[in-house]
Image (cartoon, grey):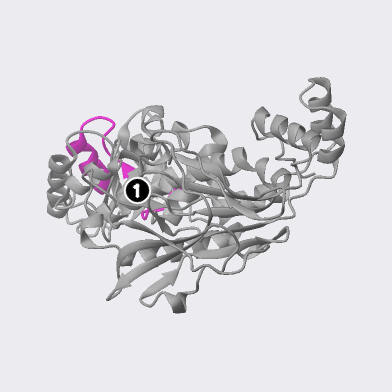
Amino acid sequence: MTSSTALLTDRYELTMLAAALRDGTAARPSVFELFARRLSGGRRFGVVAGTGRLLSLLRDFRFGEDELRFLRDNHVVDAETLTYLENYRFTGSIHGYREGELYFPGSPILTVEGSFADAVVLETIALSVMNHDSAVATAASRMSIAAGERPLSEMGSRRAAEMSAVAAARAAYIAGFGATSNLEAGRRWDIPTMGTAAHSWTLLHETEEDAFRAQIDSLGVDTTLLVDTYDIREGVATAIRVAGTDLGGVRLDSGDLPTVAAAVREHLDELGARNTKITVTSDLDEYAIAALAASPVDFYGVGTSVVTGSGYPTAGMVYKLVARQDAGGGWVAVAKASTDKGSKGGRKAAFRTLRDGVATAETVVVSDGFEELGTAAEHPGSRPLQVTLVDGGEIDSSYEGAAGTASAREHHLHVREELPVRALALSKSDPAIPTLFVDAPQGPTGP
């Protein structure tokens, strides 16, 4: 039986709904927008992730008997609201950036259109998913850029909550990692899985050699042996003595990695194991990976840093009402004006401006009402950034599941090629391209 996702929300979403039902504004057509005011940590770009997960969670955003009983027993909302929620199903539309797309400050990542009642209750779940997954994907993309052609594996499940770990594995894969240690992520989204043995395997046995022989008997000589439980040089010698020069790989999880990796490569070559690969793990982040660029390393395994957004575990996105109908049926752009927390009202269309295939600006067209926001033909040298994710309550399933995840990964790796060279640096700086807001041509208003 499918589990409801409707209570993965904050109480004030439902108390606002209750008040809107009472004062008659619940049915008022509204436009909400999910965006980031700034990029976390002085990063130069962000990566949109979580869209496919959000759509699947939206399918199950229903208030069944258990959810309604909890709300009633805890006096969260009144009887009228309970009756409304009993039949709740999102019937509006959602447009947004494709998963895997790059975003910048002010990018309209998701635009949710419907009645106020339709859209307001989605705020928490949308931000919960998009903030977490986009933070992980942004960190993962930076690591992928730093790694260059060397493969990356995500192995941070033990450093995150159990379901966050599954989501993080997916986000990292979209942003350029090639595999995960998390089996549920592998099953759910068809992500390649990897993993051999931890230090406990070596410690279980009387000798390191016994442990290596048992692992090879089980997994074959293509396996990777962890050689730093005791003395690394002796571990490498034992590994080759047991497996022969066709050993698949060795893993290093401690020490000064550039120095250790160089010594291990030299030792492997001396022993004739020139094709044996070196994997390094040990608390890597994008900076440590970049520092290893000149080292004889073949694979990276990243744990804590990637699943926690490498120091920035949330993308800082917000979900704000940007337009609504007034009492007379006309459209009004609305915006929060608080210091450092302002927003820009109006419906928006976004285009990535390119010159010779390189991004130069994020152009966001803003409308006070429902004027035409423009097409790619009206923005030569640009490509449109938004797609229809939900239309009249109908979810586009192509963005979900394993196929949607693979598509998001492909899209990210493609659009990352549009970044200017300055965007690839790891140091803190302004966004790689500016966000330019332009007004839509004036025209007739109407839904």
Residue 247 covered by magenta stretch = no
Identity of the residue drawn at 48% across and 65% down: 440
The residue wearing badge 1 is 224
Q: Secondary structure at mark 1?
A: strand
Name the amino acid type tagged 1. Answer: Thr
On the rendered image, what quadrant is the C terminus found in?
A: bottom right
Reply above or below: 18 against 386.
above
Identity of the residue drawn at 48% across and 45% down: 133
Q: Is residue 132 left or right of residue 123?
A: left
Front residue (pair 248, 428): 428
For residue 388, say whether it is visible: yes
Q: Is residue 249 left or right of residue 156?
A: left
Percent of width and height locating residue 260: 16, 40
Front residue (pair 126, 222): 126
For residue 298, say whether it is visible: no
On the rendered image, what quadrant is the N terminus found in?
A: top right
Residue numbers of the magenta segment = 217-241
Percent of width and height locating residue 213: 37, 43
Identity of the residue drawn at 27% across and 76% down: 356
Reply above or below: 83 against 331.
above
Q: Is residue 427 left or right of residue 373?
A: left
